[in-house]
Image (cartoon, rainbow, N blue to C red):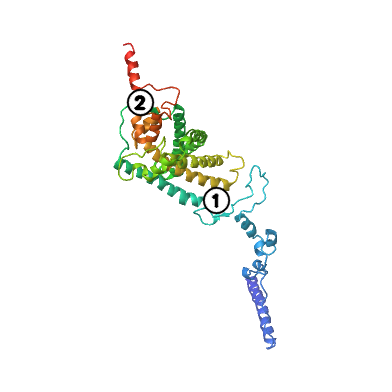
Amino acid sequence: MKHIMWSLALTAGLAWVPAHAQAQDASAAPAAMAPAPAAAPGGIQSQNIFEIKPDASADPQYADQTNAERAKVQPGNNAPMWRQVGQGVTGYSSLPRTQAPEAGNLIQPMVAYPGARVTNAGEGWRQVRNQWIIPYGAALLGLVLLALAIFYFTKGPMGHEHPESDRRIERFTPFERAAHWANAGAFIALAISGIVMAFGKFFLLPVIGSTLFGWLAYALKNVHNFMGPLFAVSLLVIILTFVKDNIANRADFIWLSKGGGLLGGGDHQVPSHRFNAGEKGLFWWGITIPGIFVVATGLVLDKLIPGFGDVRGDMQIAHMVHAVLAIWMMALICGHIYMGTVGMRGAYKAMKTGYVSEGWAREHHELWADDVRAGKIPAQRSSVAVPTESAARAAQAARPT
């Protein structure tokens, strides 16, 4: 107990001495002397970043500073580097330019693609594709199909039924028909695969699911790649084979002025040569001219043309041209398919067998039929003649029973 009391007394005495000394110092200080400022606490002091000097923007060369120069006033600020990246400036890359010409470019430079605002090329291409090509392309194809359906149910098939006779004219040779069907088959395969790849996520993906749609798109992409060369070769054959009969002449302007016989409400076909102005227009503006550009851009997209397709800009421009002209071709060829099947009586048989009756030729291509009758154009152009109905009946009657 005695030890506890001594400890409490010692503690109280130690606490009283400093307090008493501080009170005496305060009373002894002169009244005129200002109190001494409190000592600053130790450690790092914070400061407003807007009061840091010198300010980086105060430098007249602020916008042109390199990372090393900026690091003197604002360490860690990589704004110059990212500004150059956004502008498409090529940086250093250890990969050879022959193998990776854009290895040093993270973001493409600013461009203004048609229909897109000024932005980097990648974003501009995305805007053109998603805001113009896809919606308006689908609308064009839909309107064409709707117009053809309305025309069929209101107008019906054009032309008249012509009985087969001994007098038949060879409209297409076996070589011409082979070239046509090869080109048509390749085009249909390309069109179906292209439609699925471009529009499939809107009408197929919700139905069959992402897994099946992914496999289907992958398979059709390979079909698209392998059918492209067949289309290119057959297109060249088609152009060289039919170009001589698709040169415009005076009869074509008359045909156009009368709308091919549709104006005036009559069912009379305007005289024309082997191909009328509508067929010639399709040949030039629906097949030949757009087909050449579609093939060329397709080869660029497949990186089959040396010097093209190595950079993203080439691929983006090639894709936009390829997609626009392919949709344009599909829209026009839908009309061609319609007229060649249910839209005109006897048209499909002409491409299937190669022959038409003289009555059909005079109704739809009167000037061509006149040239055949006059001997200017041979009625039989291929070396192997197809037997007439009378010859076929005679051959069948001569067979032993």
Q: Quadrant of the C terminus?
A: top left
Give the camera-side residue of 14 and 256.
256
| Count of number-bearing discs | 2
Give the camera-side residue of 106 and 339.
339
**Residue 286 place in picture, x, y as percent:** 45, 41
* Amino acid type, callout 1: Gly
Q: Is residue 114 visible?
A: yes
Residue topped by disc 2 = 167
Neighbours of disc 2 within 10 Å: few (<14), some (14-19), many (20+):
few
How far apart marks 2 and 1 lie (CA) works out to 62 Å
Task: Identify the image quadrant of residue 265.
Answer: top left
* Amino acid type, callout 2: Arg
Residue topped by disc 1 = 122
**Residue 281 place in picture, x, y as percent:** 44, 41
Question: Left or right: where does residue 280 sit relative to residue 389?
Answer: right
Q: With respect to residue 39, does 192 lie above or below?
A: above
**Residue 399 place in picture, x, y as percent:** 34, 13
Q: Is residue 48 visible?
A: no
Question: Left or right: where does residue 155 sit relative to residue 105?
Answer: left
**Residue 324 place in picture, x, y as percent:** 48, 46
Q: With respect to residue 310, does 241 lie above or below?
A: above
Q: Helix, strand, or loop for circle 2?
A: loop
Q: Helix, strand, or loop for circle 1?
A: helix
